[in-house]
Image: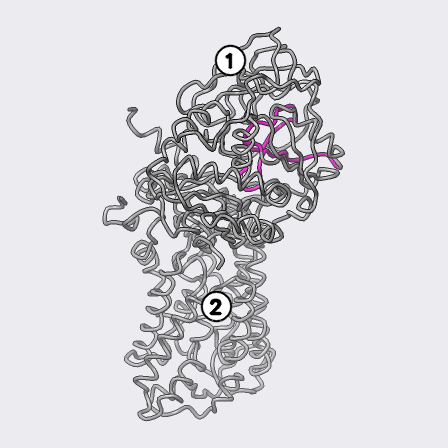
Amino acid sequence: MSELMKVKVSSSPHIRAEDSTRSIMLDVIIALMPALAVGIFVFGGRAAVHAIVCVLTSVLAEYVYQKLMHKPIAAFDGSAAVTGLLLALSLPVSAPLWISIVGSLFAIIIVKQLYGGIGKNFMNPALAARAFLFSWSGIMTTYTAIRTKLPLFTSTYDVVSSATPMAQLKLGVMPDASAMDMVLGMTPGCIGETSALALVAGAVYLLYRRVITWHIPVSYLGTVALITFLFPRVPGQNFQCMLAEICAGGILIGACFMANDYTTSPINKRGQIVYGIGCGAITILIRYFGSYPEGVTYAILIMNATVYLIEKATASRVFGHKVKPFEMGGQGK
Amino acid sequence: MVYTFKRGTHPDGNKEHTQDKSIEILKAPEYVVLPVSMHIGAPAKVLVKAGDTVKLGQMIAEAGGFVSAPVHATVSGTVTKVEPRLHPNGSKVMSVVIENDFNDTWDDSVQPFDYENMTQDELCDALMKSGIVGHGGAAFPTHVKVKSGIGNIDTIIINGAECEPYITSDHRLLLERPEEIITGIEILMKIFGVRNAKLAIEKNKSNTFERIEELLAHNDGIELCPLEVKYPQGAEKQLIYAVTQREVPSKKLPADAGCAVFNVDTCGAICRYFTLGQPMYRRIVTVSGSAISNPKNLEVRIGTPISNLVEFCGGFVRDPYKLLMGGPMMGVAQFTTDIPVIKGTNAFLAFDKTGDLPKPTQCIRCGRCVDVCPMSLMPTYLYHMNEKNNLDGLVGYNTMDCIECGACTYICPAKLPLVQGIRAGKHKIIASQPKK
């Protein structure tokens, strides 16, 4: 009998792929950096302050909650930082800093942790917090003109509100901003949503790193492109309208970074396409017929609520079976 | 044309450690340990007792039923013990221990067959006594596959996918001994009475293609099918789908899709049995992994202690932390090297501490497990249903169709033990069903 060795016995498989939750979240943070950089360039240092406050509050809130509830500490897996960053990028730069803090606390504590933490929340935390912050609608819909000097920390009550491209489209006129302005991000709007180029660069990075797949962004943007091309809000300007609807407002950040949040989107590819189409259609319905100029936040939140149903309805046929696993009542054949 | 199945994943091959190393013949050991259960089915019944003299190739245990296989002496010498010994499956199994006299005296029963002139039935009956079982790892008795397949199948598929990382035993065989394999395929075609055979090999072994094409030039019934390099390409159902586009129906056998699948080394064994009369007494084993000094491909006698193989490969370079019988995706972890090579042993791997597994965290619903599942299941659903003892859900979402390839666990960024949970779920389903 050979001497006993100190070896580990476990059930197969015995190897794991390299990607981890943390590496994925780090990739998302990297992918958001171009949008944040443009935001800081266009709206000034106050944009950076918002980002820092949101990220710190989110991570700290998650840590304190997990500590108090005697849960395993997962605050540093990067997901809380992503939530904070996304929230900051979807705030107007003139918002007071307490908005950042309240929004982050709401996102992490109410939307994420109370439902069980990462992977268990049914709504995108950053978007749910943004929707909650619309309780202060004056603050949330005041968009300063680009390149305005704002104080870094103190509140800014006397800013001059400037019309966003979305607001102009709502009125049925083409935006003042040129297509180039919208691509580069030189338009009024939320901190991180104005530059199409920066957002697309981030999305391409995530696609290259295989953190995301094309299914949700393409089905979401494709739906929006199709409807806005066929039924433009400014008659006769089909192509220009389509371009403006996609490049301005929150659609790109929504389609590439929020709608495809893992936790709150379908896990199967066919479901993701259905979900993306739903996001696109509801966004347009709100933009065209709602009283808000922008519809991305609510479109994604509404579709978040349908994810479980979509997954069940679009489940794949299992290999060797004739029918799909889900029949009403949960009994597959 | 490159054949493949849907979904699947790409673990690092790690085959470079051994793929260029010729098969070396490991000297027969001083003693061999032959468990009576080296196959799926009933254990074999021991025919010898301590003190008996046995010859190489002599049947020492007969099949314990139809789904069973006999065991033959893999050295000549003296039976020293018939007692339960540790088996690679972790339990103690009745085993015959033979002390080698190093003469390798062949038993009189080992005679070539005049297989060209034998009938289907005669060939089948001969195969029953060969002790040959599937060499790919599952060790299903070959004669059972043949008997149940005759008349039902139109295509024989030869599995040279070898999709498990590290393992190169089939690769080396295809490179060094393709004649044996092709003769084996021709015998199988004769037994089944079919005209089509497909030799399916993953493209990472394309250096074997030229010679095989040459050998196949005279036989247009056998087709070489290059496969995409993807895991689990060598899983029976996935391989059948890849080369024929047929799905084996749920809970049915390959024969229900008109196919029978054999490993390349099984074909070699069939060739050696009919042309030389040799029953299954040796096989090729890859010894590799980060803790092995000098990884090799070895031809070894069945029953050789694993410690002999490790020693022949220069021993452990570092303290081993994980020992595996088989590949890293589906292999069985071992706690000692004091176990014998059995009929299904295609590899023995040893890893150092760097192979330690990460701690699991919460599912982030990234959907990667769904993307890779070759059976189109939803692994994270099944895993969580098992955690919650949701039997209706487990049954409704077709848990029993899981082939336990481990692709979901491999890919999971939250490092959840998905397939392990699904296995537990399967056991719960089986336990809940009324006994027949």
Q: Is residue B28 above or below residue B373?
A: above
Which quadrant would residue B313 be assigned to in this image? top right
Name the residue carrying label 1. B46
Decide which of A15, B216 is in the foreground and name it: B216
Identity of the residue drawn at 41% across and 33% down: B145
Tell me the magenta residue range: B318-345
Camera sees residue A39: yes
Left or right: B93 in relation to B257:
right
* Residue A132 magenta: no
* Residue B321 magenta: yes
Decide which of B411, A38 is in the foreground and name it: B411
Name the residue carrying label 2. A257
Residue A198 x, y percent position in the rendering: 55, 77
Q: Is residue B92 above or below residue B234?
A: above
Camera sees residue A63: no
Q: Chain of mark 1?
A: B
Decide which of B54, A51 is in the foreground and name it: B54
Q: Quadrant of the C terminus of chain A?
A: top left
The answer to whether mark 2 and mark 1 are in CB contact below 8 A is: no
The total number of labels drawn is 2
Residue B433 x, y percent position in the rendering: 30, 29
The residue positioned farthest toward the front in the image shown: B117
